[in-house]
Image (cartoon, rainbow, N blue to C red):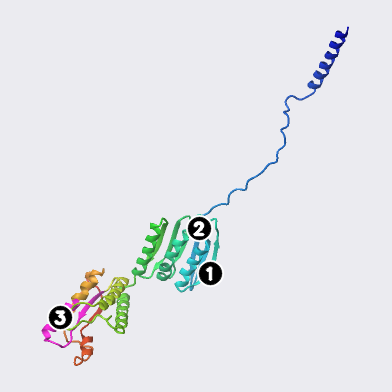
Amino acid sequence: MAVLVGLLGLTALLAVAYLWAAGQDPATPAAPPSTSETTTAPPPTKEPSSLRIERDNTAVLLEGNVKTASEREALLAAVRNSGFEVDDAITISPDVTDSDTRLVAVLLPPLLDGTEDGELSLREGTVTITGEALDPVEAEEIRAAIDDMTAAGLIVDDLTTTRILPESVQIVALQEEIDQIFELARTIEGQYPNFAVSIDELSVGATNTLDRVAVAMRRYPLPAADVIGHADATGSKATNLALSEARALTVLDYLVDVGVDPGRLDAIGRGETEPVADNNTEGGRAENRRVDFVVKRRTG
């Protein structure tokens, strides 16, 4: 009897358990234990440096972002050293990914000095420059700076052009510049291209002066020039004529060696016939042993 009662009680407990389980939703999973959620801030956005450089009369606008204060100062110094005021709208951003602006600072002086309307922009490693170079020498300096930037890995979109003045204007300008070079050389001992007695060799001072003449002739590429040699009155007229011709040829050869087109030069000897000082004094004779330039229209 006791065993029967025990079985009945167990059966009742199982029935109760079955009824309770049947009332639950088997599709609903047990909720996981709650955990606290944490979020990580995204890294700062990196961006390349960018610049816009625009000239307005005597002022230059610098606008954009650079990586460091030293890069900003290099740009400001490049503008100020060219004689311009600075409208500074540069932002320093440590998140900039490159230092291309250091290279841009190299290009600024020739661009500002060599053009009247030069502009520059830098974006994502590409530099775009526009403007008109004032003459071929200024264009050469801009080109040299562009070559440096290209060698350093920047892409340069060069939209500059070169101003070429009419030949008649260049003749006057070149003659004036050579005359100024010689006038300055006269005030500096040993610079003016004079010669010792019976000698047609150039001194170091004379070559320094002629180097500047060569630059002037590259600046004004259209005209030609007569290189006219002179002698003092020492010796015979025939000897002095030959010596003056040799001096003119010495100067012509030197200019050709430093890059002047030989087709632009003619050597002429005038002997002792055109003195500029008294041949009765040593100082006067030294001035007469000289070479002059007469700029002219190019033929052929």
- Residue at image position (20%, 84%) is 289
Q: Which residue is under mark 1?
A: 87
Residue 243, disc: 3
Percent x, y of residue 245 = 16, 79
Q: Position of residue 47 (x, y in %)?
A: 53, 54
Q: Amino acid at mark 2?
A: Ser
Q: Does the segment drawn in magenta span residue 236?
A: yes
Q: Earlier in the sequence, mark 3 or mark 1?
A: 1
| Front-lying residue, 27 or 159 | 27
Q: Is residue 232 above or below residue 102?
A: below
Please, is residue 295 above or below residue 7 in the view?
below
Under circle 1, the secondary element is strand
Look at the numbered disc 3 and give the secondary structure of its residue.
helix
- Cα gap from disc 2 to disc 3, whole angstroms: 63 Å
> Which of pointers 1 and 2 lies earlier in the amino acid sequence?
2
Residue 288 drawn in magenta: no
The tag on residue 49 is 2
